[in-house]
Image (cartoon, rainbow, N blue to C red):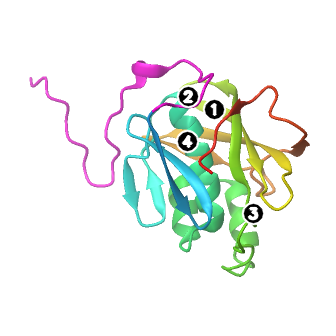
Amino acid sequence: MSDTPSTPGPGQCPATAEAASQALPTRPPADVAWTVFHGVAEPASREHGPHRHEADVHRCFARTPTGALIAAWQIATRFVLADDWRRVVESQVMPGPGRDAYVAQRAQVRADTGRAAGGYGQLAAFAIASYTPDVATVQLVSRFAATGQLQVNTVTVAWSGDDWRLRLQPDGSISPSLQAVSSLAGFVPWGGV
């Protein structure tokens, strides 16, 4: 028997070091680089992912709290903004009534709707509301440049197969509630712009 880890097959995610960092992050992840996707800054980490980039689908996040955090922001951004949003939804959103409802609603929206400069919120802060290696609930605070308004989305990702996937509400929405907040108190400030 070989001590060498097996190479993942086509389409599979590489194994990640789960035990390396299961602590909930209380400050911004250190090894993050930021890129801009359709006007929204997205974090990526060598340790926590995404480790695969396939056109609009960025996947293979670590099964860690920080992996769940990065997956929550990336998937929540990409399933709305990607040119090939259907592929993102198919591979990165949990199947069920929420996904079905989202697809029906999204199919009615023009691709360029809302892509004006400053139209989307940028990540400003986060909090991990709950975490297990199977389900994570992350609060993502967005800041809107035009108004300075802060808004909290509560996003859930579930571990399915070998990656985190977004779990939508039954009506197709991402969050059970959107809340305006007046400050980042109680959140970890973090953003790429």
Magenta stretch, residue numbers: 1-30
Quote the CA–CA distance across marks 2 and 3: 28 Å
Picture quarter containing residue 31?
A: top left
Quote the CA–CA distance across marks 3 and 1: 22 Å
- Per the image, the residue denoted by label 1 is 136
The residue sitting at 25% across, 44% down in the picture is: 8
Query: In the image, what residue type sits under mark 4?
Result: Ile
Name the disc covering residue 125, or none.
none
Label 4 secondary element: helix
The mark nearer the N terminus, 3 or 1, is 3
Residue 173 lies, in percent from the top left, at: 78, 55
Task: Indicate yes or no whether the magenta region holds residue 193.
Answer: no
- Per the image, the residue denoted by label 4 is 70
- Per the image, the residue denoted by label 3 is 101
- Per the image, the residue denoted by label 2 is 65
Label 1 secondary element: strand
Query: In the image, what residue type sits under mark 3?
Result: Ala
Picture quarter containing residue 176?
A: top right
- Closer to the camera in the image, 160 or 140: 140
The mark nearer the N terminus, 3 or 4, is 4
Q: Quadrant of the N terminus?
A: top left
Instruction: State whether residue 8 is above or below residue 1.
Output: below
Query: In the image, what residue type sits under mark 2?
Result: Pro
For disc 2, the neighbor class at 10 Å (few under 14, some 14 to 19, many from 20) is many
The mark nearer the N terminus, 2 or 1, is 2
For disc 4, the neighbor class at 10 Å (few under 14, some 14 to 19, many from 20) is many
Is there any visible trace of residue 46 in the rendered image? Answer: yes
Query: In the image, what residue type sits under mark 1?
Result: Ala
Q: Which of labels 3 and 1 is toward the front?
A: 1
The residue sitting at 46% across, 55% down in the picture is: 58
The mark nearer the N terminus, 2 or 3, is 2
